Amino acid sequence: MTFHTSSPEETIALGERIGRLLLPGDVVALRGTLAAGKTTITKGIARGLGVDEDVTSPTFTLVSEYPGRLRLYHMDVYRIDSVDDFLNLGAEEMLYGDGVCVVEWSEKVASELPARAVTIRLEALPDGARRVDIDNWDRGGLDA
């Protein structure tokens, strides 16, 4: 399914709708170029999960954890060098645990993500809007 958002606020609102529908053990694989909106949509997902903290990109920390209705593990694997580095972060515990994992730059570790992972591709459009393609979403509830 494809959505278009025209502002960061709309991208956050879409993420919030997604976050409200996520269940324990869900994995969200984010893809897109720099500044495509991966962290922005994650802010909304966090809000939908009941996270009260401000979500920022974990580019240098690699993983940030946030308590909410479900624990959110926000991973940014842009700076990792290999799948082994990803696994050494304790990724399997987070990917197959009771929380929700959001993985930015997920294409770098696609071989390690569960087949059930929801893939969200974000694309910045020339007019500043975002195209958001969501694949492997099987529970409905996202229609406008």
Image (cartoon, helix red, strand yellow):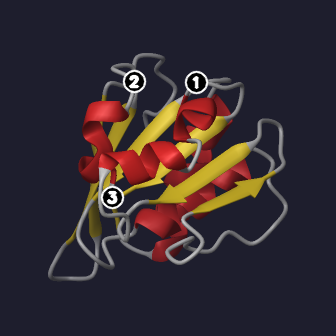
Find numbered disc 1 in the image and state the secondary structure of the residue it sits on. Answer: loop
Label ID, residue 114: 2
For disc 1, the neighbor class at 10 Å (few under 14, some 14 to 19, many from 20) is: some
The one of 39 and 59 positioned closer to us in this rendering: 59
Q: Which residue is mark 3?
A: 105
Real-space Cα separation, disc 1 to disc 2, in angstroms: 8 Å
Find numbered disc 3 in the image and state the secondary structure of the residue it sits on. Answer: loop
User: How far from the left and from the top, in percent, is residue 92?
Assistant: 54, 32
Name, please, the residue furthest toward the left.
126
In the rendered structure, are the residues bearing label 1 and label 2 in contact, judged by CB atoms less than 8 Å apart?
yes
Does label 3 or label 1 sit earlier along the sequence? Answer: 1
The one of 69 and 91 positioned closer to us in this rendering: 91
Indicate whether 122 appears above or below 26: below
Q: Amino acid at mark 2?
A: Pro
Q: Which residue is mark 1?
A: 96
Does label 2 or label 3 sit earlier along the sequence? Answer: 3
Q: Amino acid at mark 3?
A: Trp
The part of the image, by quadrant, that contains residue 136 is top left
Q: Please indicate whether residue 120 sits to the left or right of residue 21 in the image.
A: left
Q: Amino acid at mark 1?
A: Tyr
